[in-house]
Image (cartoon, rainbow, N blue to C red):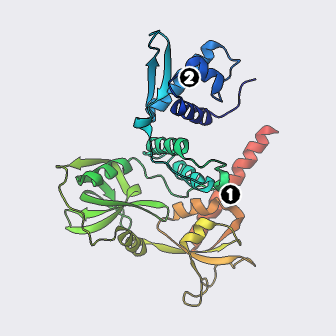
Amino acid sequence: MADPRAPAERLLNLVIALLNTSGRMTKEQIRRSVAGYDASASTEAFERMFERDKETLRELGVPVMTVADPAHGDDQGYRIDPDAYALPPMELSAAQLGVLRLAAEFWQGQPLRADAARGLTKLTATARGTGSTDVVAGLAPRIQPAGPSLAPLLDAAHARRRVQFTYRTARTGSVGRRTVEPWRIVASRGGWYLVGLDVDRAASRVFRLSRIDGAVRPVGPEAAFEVPTDVDPRALVISAQRREGRIAVLAVAPDRCGALRARAARLDATTGPPEPGDVSCPPGFDVVRVPYARTGELADEVARYADAVVVLSPPRLREAVVARLEAAVQLGERIGGGRG
């Protein structure tokens, strides 16, 4: 019976084996000793699997070397060069490895997913700590994808090179060309932001990456500017969010909705109760205030919690959440009806 191990676990086993071999491992040795390769499979099936795994590791930056037998040049083996792959000794606990896996999961679907996968493979293979890494199972980062503009902006910020892009403002929806000296990229409240100098306006500005239309184009030479040392990029982002943002008043079930609670301030006497005419808070629920910029984005997030969240205000957000939940119910009924 074929070994049901996941391909990722088989790759990790192969990395560990090739790192720890004293000389080299032939294909037959790999087939017999590396967990995940089915010893009863045909030679052709093993060859295809191993060649695919070997190329995958090389694409991830793992230096798999081909080593010939000194006495028989046609007898090839494989190993990983420790000098090219080595990291300092580390003692990582199961919880720490779990957090690393969670961080890598965050980058799935992002422009930097290959770099995240490469780093996680190296850390997992070289860490001395072992054990289960499922201590954070069930958690998922709640942040919107950065989109294709993230990678070129990171490159430009690192090179201190100006960029140009088309930007759509939040308040008016007007679209215009911007020339920016990129200082920092900041992730905050579920979104991605560029902090930099707007060259045409000669002032620092904050740009939400989701409002960049089209490609980001680098212009001019590298090292064209210096990043101010007295600027706090995160403070600028928070200030911009306050200027453009709104507040949603939500009732959340006890011990639920951790991501919403993390962004919320507890409703107290200084903020006052929900506005008259809004729905009432269910008994036992906590009332929190969550800042947001876009109704659709917060509605998508709230709808995922189903009955654990009730939108007290504003009405437009509540209507958007209800519409999403109703659409989900209708879809479920259509799917269920089709099975009958």
Pointer 2: what residue?
A: 50
Quarter holding the C terminus? top right
Q: Secondary structure at mark 2?
A: helix
Residue 100 x/y as whole percent? 54, 52
Could you say whether the residue bearing mark 1 is in a helix, strand or loop?
A: helix
* Quadrant (top left, top right, bottom left, bottom right) of the N terminus: top right
Decide if residue 56 is on the left or right side of residue 239.
right
Q: Nearer the viewer, residue 189 or 132?
A: 132
Classed neighbour count for the residue bearing mark 1: other residues with Cα under 10 Å, few (<14), some (14–19), many (≥20): few
Q: Amino acid at mark 2?
A: Phe
Residue 308 falls in which quadrant of the image? bottom right
Name which residue lies at 31% across and 49% down. Answer: 155
Where is residue 153 drawn, in percent x and y?
Answer: 32, 52
Report whether residue 37 is seen: no
Q: Position of residue 70 (x, y in %)?
A: 44, 13
Mark 1, residue position: 326
Relative placement, left or right, of 22 versus 183 is right
Real-space CA distance between mark 1 and mark 2, rounded to the nearest whole angstrom? 48 Å
Is 306 displayed left or right of 196 in the figure? right
